[in-house]
């Protein structure tokens, strides 16, 4: 049964391009006994109505390390896990992604870990990354029509169906190969589901809507993926590759106001990443990618990159400096999607 569940989970991880090393509670079973022995020998545990608890400075509630019946608790396994991650796995940054209701618990675990010497916060960063609740369009907790919890596998399947429907409505099956269509379907479906979750402030509730997330207008993955494929196609449509542009000695004057606006937007990327790493919020990156795509649209509408003869349609002039701005935009958007765990495609 356990193996079957693990295989089912693994299938979902693969669909979402997620890679992880599983560490179930049983993995820490022997370590819990070692932690209890260590804390007892160093007199960190106190008796409390048959329990053995551990207090930490400024923490109102202690950890229950041993229950009155001699059993261990989540507090015990969390202390054992913290010790193992620091001492054995040599972690320098540990992020706990757990709902906001566990904030006090993790503050106490971190404080007790410091008191016991299991972690030195001058060398190891500890963060509790909490999150809010996903709501249905009725503003209630997201469930199926029958009232059951929505399964992620079912959500991904529905996403695939809806994304294919959107692609067929746009007649993309007439210009894409079957393999390109499949890749576009998966990129839109899985990307939109991930983006809908990540583009909101993680501590706030948000309303889940397939119609909204698959809309190719506004701050959605669908819109941004379409924007990225259009940007990538600009140089490709005149037979220029990114490698050729990068290897040529091309200047980027940045004289037009829209060129300067785009260049400034591109230069903000490191700042956005630094803030994201410090605060552990991903929605500013989503906002940045959307703003960047809007800024690029202004640039492209006002600054010609490829000039064509209005009569014959032949290319008469190519501004390679501006094409480099296009490729820089595409590179940063691609990197942003990579950070968000969203696949991109060349054609869509």
Image (tube, rainbow, N blue to C red):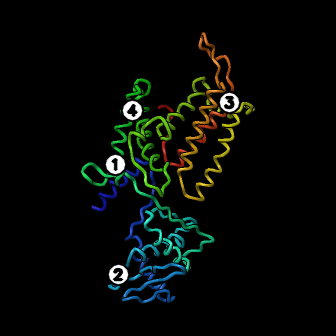
Mark 2 touches mark 1? (CB < 8 Å): no
Which of the marked residues, 3 or 2, is nearer the chain's N terminus?
Answer: 2
Instruction: Look at discs 1 and 4 and give the one toward the viewer.
Output: 1
Mark 3 touches mark 4? (CB < 8 Å): no
Q: Residue drawn at (42%, 62%), measured in percent from left and top?
A: 22
Which of the marked residues, 2 or 1, is nearer the chain's N terminus?
Answer: 2
Instruction: Look at discs 3 and 1 and give the one toward the viewer.
Output: 1
Nearest the camera: 40 or 247?
Answer: 40
Mark 3 touches mark 2? (CB < 8 Å): no
Q: Which residue is mark 3?
A: 322
Across and down, in percent, residue 332 comes to: 60, 42
Spot the residue most to the left: 146
Q: Label 4, label 2: how many angstroms apart (C-alpha)?
A: 54 Å
Q: Residues within 10 Å of mark 4 (few under 14, many from 20)?
A: some
Residue 11 in view in this figure: no
Which of the marked residues, 3 or 4, is nearer the chain's N terminus?
Answer: 4
Q: Which residue is mark 4?
A: 166
Mark linked to residue 71: 2
Instruction: Look at discs 4 and 2 and give the one toward the viewer.
Output: 4
Q: Label 2, label 1: how many angstroms apart (C-alpha)?
A: 43 Å
Across and down, in percent, residue 296 comes to: 61, 34
Q: Which residue is mark 1?
A: 138
Label 2 sits on a secondary structure element that is: loop
Q: Label 3, label 4: how many angstroms apart (C-alpha)?
A: 32 Å
Which of the marked residues, 1 or 4, is nearer the chain's N terminus?
Answer: 1
Label 4 sits on a secondary structure element that is: helix
Task: Determine whether, in the image, residue 1 is placed left or right of residue 328.
Answer: left
Q: Residue drawn at (40%, 52%), measured in percent from left and top?
A: 13
Mark 1 touches mark 4? (CB < 8 Å): no
Q: Residues within 10 Å of mark 3 (few under 14, many from 20)?
A: many
Instruction: Look at discs 2 and 1 and give the one toward the viewer.
Output: 1
């Amino acid at each position: 049964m356990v193996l079957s569940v693990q295989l089912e989970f693994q299938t979902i991880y693969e669909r979402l391009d997620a890679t992880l090393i599983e560490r179930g509670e049983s993995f820490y079973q022997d370590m819990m006994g070692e932690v209890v022995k260590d804390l007892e020998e160093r007199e960190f545990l106190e008796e409390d109505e048959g329990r053995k608890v551990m207090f930490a400075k400024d923490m109102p509630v202690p950890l229950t390390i041993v229950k009155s019946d001699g059993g261990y608790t989540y507090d015990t396994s969390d202390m054992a896990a913290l010790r193992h991650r620091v001492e054995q796995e040599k972690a320098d940054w540990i992020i706990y992604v757990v709902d906001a209701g566990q904030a006090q618990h993790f503050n106490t675990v971190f404080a007790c870990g410091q008191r016991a010497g299991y972690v030195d916060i001058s060398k190891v960063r500890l963060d509790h990354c909490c999150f809010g609740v996903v709501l249905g369009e009725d503003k209630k907790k997201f469930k199926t029509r029958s009232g059951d919890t929505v399964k992620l596998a079912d959500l991904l399947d529905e996403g695939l169906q809806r994304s294919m429907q959107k692609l067929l409505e746009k007649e993309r099956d007439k210009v894409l190969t079957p393999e390109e269509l499949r890749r576009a379907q998966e990129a839109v479906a899985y990307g939109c589901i991930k983006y809908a979750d990540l583009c909101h402030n993680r501590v706030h509730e948000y309303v889940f809507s397939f119609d909204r997330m698959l809309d190719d207008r506004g701050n959605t993955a669908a819109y941004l993926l379409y924007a990225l494929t259009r940007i990538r196609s600009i140089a490709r449509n005149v037979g220029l590759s990114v490698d050729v542009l990068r290897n040529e000695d091309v200047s980027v004057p940045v004289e037009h106001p829209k060129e300067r606006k785009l260049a400034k937007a591109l230069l903000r990327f490191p700042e956005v990443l630094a803030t994201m790493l410090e605060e552990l919020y991903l929605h500013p990156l989503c906002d940045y990618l959307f703003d960047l795509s809007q800024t690029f649209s202004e640039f492209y509408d006002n600054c010609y990159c490829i000039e064509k003869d209005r009569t014959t349609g032949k290319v008469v002039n190519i501004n390679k400096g501006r094409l480099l701005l296009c490729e820089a935009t595409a590179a940063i958007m691609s990197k942003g999607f990579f950070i968000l765990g969203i696949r991109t495609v060349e054609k869509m």
